Image (cartoon, rainbow, N blue to C red):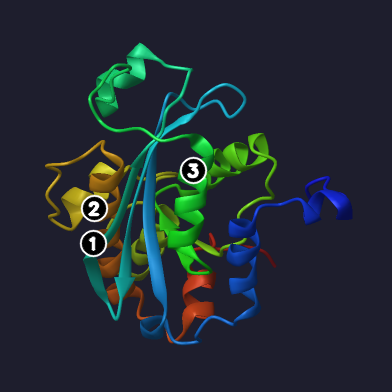
Amino acid sequence: MWPFSSKKQLELPPFWWEYEDGFHQKLPDKVQENTFVVWDTETTGFRLDRDRMLCIGAVKLMNGSIAVKDSFEVYIHQEHYDAESAEIHGILRKGKRERISELEALKLFLGYIKNHVLVGHHVMFDVNMVNAALRRNGLPKLKNKTLDTGLLYKRTLLISNVLQKKEKYALDELAEKFSISKKDRHTALGDALITAIAFLRIVEKLTPRNLKDLIKKQDPPKFGL
């Protein structure tokens, strides 16, 4: 838990309380009745103590379809910058894209995701990056349930028993497996779209009865007596 006193909680901004209030409402049981937010972040690196988010991109899945017109993309002004990571994501220090503050980006992102399930490829990296940003700005952690397409994809291999499972699968491998275009790869919104399509294909294979089953299906198998 985050070390917030009751006095500190009262000082949290209204947009946080609006986000938190959404979790008083129970998510639908059926997968098709849920809205999923599929997202990705582009960062200056992989260290939570030093690196920062440069961009957040997301799309919503509703009724088994991608709501392309309801996409989300923000670029964030940061003082920290890494030239090597820029070669991958292409976000330059003095680029022409409009950038907003980290706090404003968090406010917009929380308003977008509401209480919906967050879906990402190796999703906990993105969750941890956002949580680090929330903490820097005096806010509690994300409250959303999460689904990881990397873990879910491994469950489809258990069912098909075609390939020998690896510890991790890159997003590129899922794109190739499901014949998904990688035109906008290594942009936050582009990777979110690739992940969204892969997620839909994975759900088709897993055929979960309800959301609870889907969340369980991402867990690695447990072996024992």
Local packing at callout 1 (Cα closer than 10 Å; few below 14, some 14-19, many 20+) is many
Q: Amino acid at mark 2?
A: Ile
Whichever of labels 3 and 1 marks the residue nearer the N terminus, that label is 3
Instruction: State yes or no: discs 2 and 1 in contact (Cβ < 8 Å).
Output: yes
**Separation of residues labelled 3 and 2 (CA atoms):** 26 Å
Spot occupied by residue 6 in the image (x, y as percentages of width and height): 87, 55
Front residue of this view, candidates 56 and 31: 56
Q: Residue at x 34, y 62 (%)?
A: 157
**Separation of residues labelled 2 and 1 (CA atoms):** 5 Å
Q: Residue at x 43, y 61 (%)?
A: 112
Local packing at callout 2 (Cα closer than 10 Å; few below 14, some 14-19, many 20+) is many
Local packing at callout 3 (Cα closer than 10 Å; few below 14, some 14-19, many 20+) is few
Circle nearer the viewer, 3 or 1? 3
Q: Which mark is residue 104?
A: 3
Q: Amino acid at mark 3?
A: Glu
Tag 3 secondary structure: helix
The residue singled out by tag 1 in the image is: 197
Q: Amino acid at mark 1?
A: Ile
Q: Quadrant of the C terminus?
A: bottom right
Q: Residue at x 33, y 65 (%)?
A: 60
Instruction: State yes or no: discs 3 and 2 in contact (Cβ < 8 Å).
Output: no
Spot occupied by residue 113 in the image (x, y as percentages of width and height): 46, 62
Q: Is residue 48 above or below residue 143?
A: above
The residue singled out by tag 2 in the image is: 194
Front residue of this view, candidates 115 and 47: 115
Spot occupied by residue 223 in the image (x, y as percentages of width and height): 61, 62
